Amino acid sequence: MNTKHFRFGVTLFSITLILALFAGAGGGAVLAQGLPPVTPEPPLIVGGAPADPGEWPWQVALVDGAATDLYADQFCGGSLVANDWVVTAAHCVDGLALADVDVVAGIYNLQTPAAGYQRRDVRKIVIHPSWNSANNNYDIALLRLKTPVTLGGSGATKTQTIELVAPTIGDLVGFNSWVTGWGNTESVPMWPTQLYEVEVPIITNAICNDSSHYAGGITNNMLCAGFDVGGKDSCQGDSGGPLVIQDVSGQYRLAGIVSWGDGCAEPMLPGVYTRVSNFTTWVKAEITPPPTVTTYNSLGADDGYILESNENTSVGGSQNFASGYIGAGDDVLNKQYRSILSFNTSSLPDNAIISKVTLRVRSITTVGTSPFVTHGNLLGDIKKGSFSGLRGLELADFASASSKDSAFVILKTAVSSGWFYASLASANFKFVNVNGLTQVRLRFETDDNNDHGADILRFYSGDLADADYRPQLVIEYSLP
């Protein structure tokens, strides 16, 4: 059995150093390993063939961060899973500083790359916390790019992300898979410059782990792909690169990461890959962290209620901003109550990517018949800034134009402890003001029900000493 090895390549500098060391002790030993005697270069896949330019647009090359020659200094591969995230093998980046590695996307020929390839610095390296170099288990890592890759294009510079297989996809036995990379071909030419591909079948872990194969060296986090007769395999220089399958719809999915093997394309010793389905949830959690959740309480000095001047005038007649409650409905003269909630949302980052906005108000009591019975749903008009143009409660707030009418629709079903809530549609997130006030005007669908009876639903206002009961605007967001 050949010596177990990872499948990452060696750079021009490291090969040159090896050549020099062996030359001092009889350089023939180096040449016996198949290294070129003059200009050592990065290796490619065994038993495969050149891919078509742009055929595998998620494939990226990892190169030395100081490299001026991409061909000589490529040492591993990887896969674009987002425009700013790459999946690779842990052993490719274990012990490296950020400055030690760059990612090159949209590249086919490392020696003479087509104009338009994209080289990116790395801002973050995330190695799986359970990575074990002693047994090659959990061989997966993530690289976050300082600048996102621009997706699209065509031909040799085409870039595209690839979806991960689902955690529930199963063992994949019987699937044919494709492996790509700039790794050793162990053939002539041994050191081609373009991206290579090879198709290999996925086999059971039980077979791969038996005494004829890897004799117990395969964990549940690994999968094996290859032929018992050998001849086709990934090899040095391919590490971290993709093993992909096609799902029932014909969509390519990332199923494995080139990890290790004994020799390359040897009989009974298939390539060993990190089983991506075991890490899909981890990858998604890392590249899509949970959003920040910030709760803004209504400002007591600026909120309150306004009573219509007369039935059907739609003009504010009186106001109250210091009662400790707000309300909506109508009074005994069929005049409508509307309330203004004022939230200082200026602490939101200018580049916040809002994913959810929820308005919450807590009821105190009902006067007369619940307006939910007689007046329909409770609506919330939203204003980016203040309705009247002035910060405090104003009579003009009763009818001033909103940024979006009925942006919130509060149904009569209350959540626990008297809270009512409604969510803002994503198309209206733009009306949340990151530079100052965001106001909401509460009103019922029907202004009054002509019964000359007071029908009012009252809520706690921002004046309440207990902040937990004040009206709330709950905003979830992330940062790019």
Image (spheres, rainbow, N blue to C red):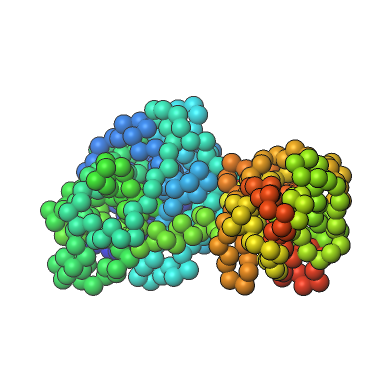
Picture coordinates of residue 133, whole percent (x, y): 40, 68
Q: Locate the N terminus by quadrant.
A: bottom left
- Residue 295 in view here: no
The answer, for residue 301, to whether it is visible in the render is: yes
- Position above or below: 48 against 165: above
Residue furthest front in the image: 451
- The residue lying furthest to the left in this view is 229
Q: How many numbered circles does the render carry?
A: 0
Q: Specify whether 67 is left or right of 476.
A: left
Q: Is residue 397 left or right of residue 8?
A: right
Decide if residue 26 is on the left or right side of residue 20: left
Please give the name of the residue rendered at 33% of the width and 66% of the height, measured from the top-left corner. 221
Residue visible at 73% across and 59% down in the picture: 454
Residue 225 percent location from the top left of the image:
23, 55
What percent of the width, then of the height, locates residue 428?
62, 43
Residue 411, compared with residue 82, is above or below; it is below
Residue 120 percent across, percent down from the top left: 55, 42
Left or right: where does residue 276 sit relative to residue 346? left
The residue closer to the viewer here, 426 or 66, is 426
Residue 187: quarter of image: top left
Name the residue rendered at 55%, 58% in the picture: 289
Picture residue at 81% right of the left edge, 52% below the top: 306
